Amino acid sequence: MGAVLASIALSESIPSDAAAGPVVTTRAQFSYGPHLGARPKPAPEFIGATNRAARRRLRLAELDRQIAGVKRQRDELAAELGLVDEALSNSELARRELPRTAPVAAALPPPREGGSHFGYSRLYTTRQRVSLASRKGAAR
């Protein structure tokens, strides 16, 4: 076993002639023949079933935090959706309570040919004011 470990060189970086033999660097890089690789970790870890179980617990705890965050977002969105549904139903109720416009539109005189409806409405209103003012003046 000692001879095998002694055959692996320890270096600061992978030398350009890495094909010469196996090399491990202090930056978690490795090379053996034509194969190069790296597996940097924030801190060294032990191997074995106990360490895998500890890493699994940490991963599960992180996933539980993420799931809780997603559930909070879902609840917030559901509350917002409820407010939007309420506003929509209120607007529908208000729309149903408004008087129908068809009788009002039918009571208005038809617009002139070639004129805009808005301009005609303004003209019609102005004529009504003039007519009303002349009637008030005639009554005096």
Image (cartoon, helix red, strand yellow):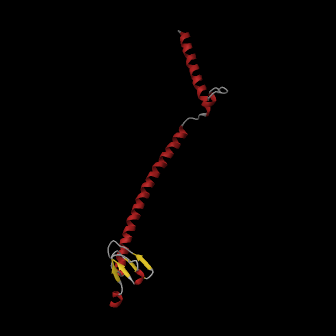
Can I make out residue 20 in this image?
yes
Residue 10 located left or right of residue 83: left
Can I make out residue 1 in this image?
no
Q: Position of residue 112 (x, y in %)?
A: 66, 25
Question: Image height check: is 132 above or below 68?
Answer: above
Q: Nearer the viewer, residue 37 or 76?
A: 37
The residue shown at (51%, 40%) is 94
Instruction: Locate the N terminus by quadrant.
Output: bottom left
Question: Image height check: is 97 above or below 130?
Answer: below
Question: Image height check: is 69 above or below 34?
Answer: above
Q: How many marks?
A: 0
Q: Nearer the viewer, residue 9 or 40?
A: 9
Q: Position of residue 101 (x, y in %)?
A: 59, 34
The residue shown at (54%, 36%) is 98
Residue at the outermost front position: 17
Residue at the outermost right position: 113
Q: Quadrant of residue 41?
A: bottom left
The residue shown at (36%, 87%) is 7
Q: Nearer the viewer, residue 78 or 33?
A: 33
